[in-house]
Image (cartoon, coloured by chain):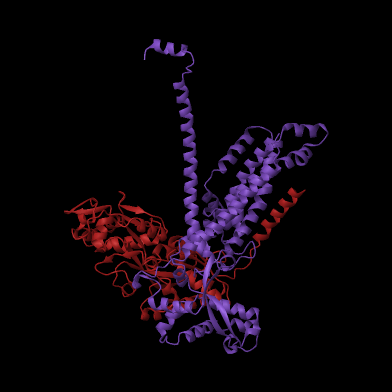
Amino acid sequence: MSDTSKFKLSEAKPDLSPKRLQKRYRAEARFRLYGITAIVFAIGVLGILLGSIISSGTSAFIQTEIALDINFDANIVDPEGTRTKESFLEGNYRKLWRDSLFTLFPEVKGRKQKRALSKLISRGADLTLREKVLNDPSIIGTTKRIWVKSSADIDSLNKGKISRSTIESDRRVKNHQIAWFDKLIDENRERLAFNSSLFTAGDSREPEQAGIGGAVVGSFLTLIVTLLLSFPIGVMAAVYLESFAPKNRWTDIIEVNINNLAAVPSIVFGLLGLAVFLNFFGMPRSAPIVGGTVLALMTLPTVIIAGRAALKAVPPSIQEAALAMGASRLQAVSHHVLPLAMPGILTGTIIGMARALGETAPLLMIGMVAFIVDIPRGLSDPSTVLPVQIYLWADAPERAFVEKTSAAIMVLLLFLILMNLAAVILRKKFEKRW
Amino acid sequence: MYLKTMSFLAAILFVAITAAEARDQIRIVGSSTVFPFSTSVAEQFGKVSKFKTPIVESTGSGGGMKLFCAGVGQKHPDITNSSRRIKKSEFNKCNKNGVGITEVKIGFDGIVLGNSKAGPDLNFSLKHVFQALAAKVPVDGKLIDNPYKMWSDIDPSLPKIKIEILGPPPTSGTRDAFVEIAMEGGAKKFPSLKALKKSNKKQFKAIAHTIREDGVFIEAGENDNLIVQKLLANPKALGIFGFSFLDQNADKIKGASIKGVSPEFEKIAEGQYPISRSLYFYVKQQHLGVIPGIKEFVKEFTKEGTWGIDGYLVDKGLIPLPSDVRKATMKAARGMDTLSM
C-alpha cells in the first residue's frame, strides 16, 4: 500500500455507516458465542467426568446380602466353654455359616462343589457372626436368621456388572453358582442393603469388605497436623514480612523464594520428608505426623502468599490510626490489621488444605502408599489417606474394585466441595470491602 | 493469644513423635505384582492370629530390595516381595549391611499378550514377539531398524493388521520379566543373534532388551486395568499384562497363544506356557524374635490353604508351585534357611 492511502486513512472521518455498525455488532455476537462455547465445553467435560464416576460408583453404596439361618452352637462358638471374649475369638465361625449354607442345598456333595457353593458368601461373614456373638452372647444356643454379605462376584452378578449371557467359561460366576443364587432369590434370602462398612471399615483385599474408614481417619489426622503447623507459621511469616520486615535485598530474596516454593512439584517435598524426617530424625514410616509435616511444608507458601495478600488489602489508614492513638506496632497489627485480614487468610488456608487433601505424590516417598487394614488411632499409627486409597484400588485386579474406586472418588470430591464452599462462605460473610 | 498457644501445641507435637516406640507390627515392602497376594495373607494373618495386621507397601521389586538391604533395626522393613530373584549385587549389599536372608518362592505369574474379544484370535511364536517389538531386528542376515508395521509383514500366516502393543514402562517388573523371557527367547531363535550371545553377551542383551520407540509400542503406565480398558476401546491393539487381569476380565479380553499354548491356569502351572516368572519374598533373619509374628506370618503364607491348589491366593490369581516343590519350599521357609549366592 502506498503512503498516500495511509495518510488518507488517518484522516478519514469515523465510519458510522449501518454496514460497519452491523459488522461491529456481529463481531461482538461472535465473541459472546466463543465465550459461551468455551463454558459449555468446560461444563460438558466436567459433566462427562462426574457422570462416569457417579454412574459407576453409586452401586458401591449398596451391597448384596444373603440370609442364612445360623445355629450358634455353643461348642463351635465357645470352644473353651468359658463364655469369655478370649474363647469367643477362638470360635470357628466359618463352620457356622458353611453348615447353614450346606443344609439349604443338601444336593451339593463333594469337596469341589462345596467349595464353589461357599464362594457365594463373603469371607468376611466370619467376622459378622463373631461380632454378633461378642455383642450379645445370649444368642449362643439359638438359631437366628442373619444377613451376611455375598461375595464380590455374586454382588457384581446381582448388580448386572457380570452379564448372565456371557458364555460360561469366560464368566467368573459359573452356571451352577447362578442356579444356587437364583434359588436363594426365590426363597427371599437375597436383598440389596446399604453398604455401611464402605464408610467404617479399613482396607481389605476382598472388595465387598473394603472400606474407606481407615483412609478418611488417616486423611483427617494428616490434615490436622498440616493445619497446626502451616497455619501459625504461615500467618506469622506473612505478618512479619508484611508489617515488620525492612524492605531490602534479603526480604526480596525471601519473597522470590516463597513464590518459587509454591510452584515446586509436590514429589520434591516427599523426597525432602524421606531424607530429613525419616532418615535424619528417625520418625516412623507411614505415620500421619510425617505426612502432615510434609504436606505442611507444601502448603506453607500458599498460606503465606494468601496471608500477605489479605494483609495488604487492609487499608494502611487503619494501622496508622492505631499508631496515632499510641498503640505499639504489635498492638496495631494484632488488634486491628490481623482480625480484619483473617477472612482472607482463612480462605487461603482452606484452599491450601484442600490441595493437601488431594495429594498422593509426596506421601509415596514416606511410605503412606500402603495396604493398611487397621484404622489408625493416633498420629504415629501407620495410616493411609483418601487419594492413596483411590490409587491403590484403581490398581487392583479384582473387577469389583472399579465401583469402589468411583465411590471413594465421590467421597473425596464431596470433601473438597465442602472445603471450597466453606472458603466461599467465609469470604462472602466476613470480608470487608473498603 | 491463640497464635502463641497454637505454635506451642505444634512444638509439643513435634517433640512427642521423636520419642518413637518399639514396633510391634511387621512391615513388608516390594513388588506391586506380589502386592495382591502379600496383602491377602497379611489381612488373613491379622484376622486369625493374635498379632497386628502387617503393613504392606507397594514400592516395586527394586525399591523394596533397596529398603530391605539398607540395614537391621526398627526402621527397616522385615520382608520384601519381589517379582524376580534377588540380584547378586543386592545380595552383596544386604550382606555388607549385616542382613541375613531367607528366600521363599511362592508361585508363578503368567505374562499375557492379550487383545479384546472383538479382535482376532492370535497365535505367536516368541520369534514373532521379538520381531514385532525389538528396536533392531535381523533381516536377510543384517541388523536393521525394525521395518515391520503389520503382523503379516512378519509372517504371512498372521493377520493383516497394524502392530500396536500397549505395555508397562521400564520401571515395571512385568516389563523386565517380559523382556527377559519373551524377547530374549525370541532373539535366540536367530542363529546370528545366538552366536552373538556366546561371543558378546552384553551386545546381545542390548539388542534383545531394547524395545522399539517408533510408536508401535505404547507405554501405558503401571496400571494394568488401564491397559485392559484401552484394549476394549481399540480391538486391533494388543496389551502386555499380568495373568490375574486376564483371569478377572475373561469376558472382555482374551490372551494370545504362544507356540500354540493359550495362557490358562493349568498350562502356566505346568510350565507349558512359556512367558511366566517366579514370585518371591525375602525375610530378614535378624528381625526374627525382635519384631513379633514374622515366623507365624511365614507359616500362614506357606499353608496349603493359602498357597496350595485350593488356597485363597489362587482365587487372587497366583499360580501355585508344583506340590513337591511347595513342600520343600515350605520346609525351608519355616526352618528359616539362609540364602547363599
- Counting the numbered discs, the total is 0
Residue at left 50%, top 59%? Answer: A406
Q: Report x, y in % for residue A64.
A: 51, 71
Instruction: Using residue B141 as the reference point, say whether residue A81 is left or right of it.
Output: right
Residue reaching furthest front? A18
A414 is higher (above) or lower (below) than B294: above
Q: Nearer the viewer, residue A414 or B123?
A: A414
A336 is higher (above) or lower (below) than A393: above
Residue reaching furthest right? A326
Residue reaching furthest top? A4
| Res. B314 image quadrant | bottom left
Q: Please identify the quadrant where the C terminus of chain B is shown.
A: bottom left
- Tint applied to chain B in the drawing: red
Q: Report x, y in % for residue A183.
A: 45, 79
Residue at left 46%, top 28%? Answer: A27
B172 is higher (above) or lower (below) than B337: above
A238 is higher (above) or lower (below) than A172: above
- Tint applied to chain A in the drawing: purple
Residue at left 52%, top 51%? Answer: A267
Residue reaching furthest left? B140
Q: Report x, y in % for residue A157.
A: 44, 70
